[in-house]
Amino acid sequence: MPRAAMVKVPPCVCGVALSLLLSATARKSTAQVPLAKSPSDSLIRVGKDRSLSIDLGTFPTVEPYLAADPSNAAHLVAGVAVITKPDVSERSCAALTSFDGGRTWTRHDFPAKECLDPWVVIRPDGSAVLALISRSELLVFRSSDGGTTWSDRPISFGEHHDHGTLAIDTTRGSFGGSVYVVSQQIVRDTGDLERFAAFVARSTDAGATFGEPTRVTSR
């Protein structure tokens, strides 16, 4: 189980921040704030529902997560956990990719046992990054061609993780383009006690590599 220098955040700080947020929200709700008009290319357009068949027989898929390409609305990538035994004792994970707005899909299965929490993002250049939990191990896979093929060897962040997620900085600031992997991880503190830590690691090369992670715990 990992040991790391951890930043301690007093619980009172969270309470004060939440109170300020709720107070600001209440003040805004009573003010007449005109809504800004959105450009037509930023609107979400809902299309026709389509069933997605990926040749799984009667086995269900669970925990789906869908990402859309910010540069190409027809490019979609989904991550799903797949039940592989009728008694629900085994699960794998798969990526589903479409380049025609969801009309047709291709499927890629990952070599991950007892898989949960698939999460995917698509970068502005069309490349995709997918995170999943395999037997508590946090793994990240990368696809330079938008989901057609995926890396054979994932990046591993060790065990004792739960609910792995991904995010991309789409701003033009100094961290623009960065990919972040975030999870909850059980760690041991200097007193050898188990703690729940917020785990964060950043990639500056589209998910090919990640820097040293940061773990944050509360008292």
Image (spheres, helix red, strand yellow):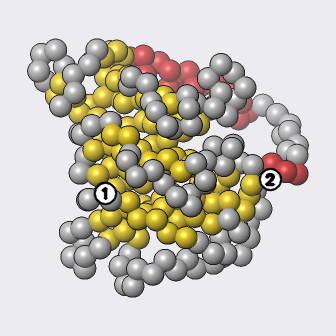
Residue furthest left as drawn: 192
Q: Look at the numbered discs 2 and 1 and tell me whether their residues touch, using CB distance below 8 Å.
A: no
User: What is the spatial separation of the Cα atoms under label 2 and label 1, in whole angstroms?
Assistant: 37 Å
Residue furthest front as drawn: 152
- Which residue is rendered at x = 29% and y = 52% of the image? 134
x and y, in percent, of residue 2 in the image: 22, 27
Q: Is residue 73 left or right of residue 209?
A: right
- Which residue is rendered at x = 23% and y = 39% of the image? 160
Figure quadrant of residue 45? bottom right
Amino acid at circle 1: Ala
Residue 183 is labelled as none
| Mark 2 residue crowding within 10 angstroms, few (<14) / some (14–19) / many (20+) | few
Figure quadrant of residue 168? top right
x and y, in percent, of residue 216 in the image: 35, 22
Relative depth, front residue between 18 and 53: 53
Q: Is residue 140 above or below residue 170?
A: below
Query: Where, quadrant-wise, is the N terminus in this rendering?
Result: top left
Relative depth, front residue between 18 and 198: 198
x and y, in percent, of residue 199 in the image: 37, 30
**Total numbered circles:** 2
| Mark 1 residue crowding within 10 angstroms, few (<14) / some (14–19) / many (20+) | some
x and y, in percent, of residue 9 in the image: 36, 16
Query: Where, quadrant-wise, is the C terminus in this rendering?
Result: top left
- Which residue is rendered at x = 31% and y = 57% of the image? 112
Foreground disc of the pair 2, 1: 1
Give the SS element for disc 1.
Answer: loop
Residue position marked by numbered label 2 in the rendering: 43
- Which residue is rendered at x = 53% and y = 50% of the image? 143
Relative depth, front residue between 9 and 50: 50
Residue position marked by numbered label 1 in the rendering: 112
Q: Is residue 19 left or right of residue 45?
A: left
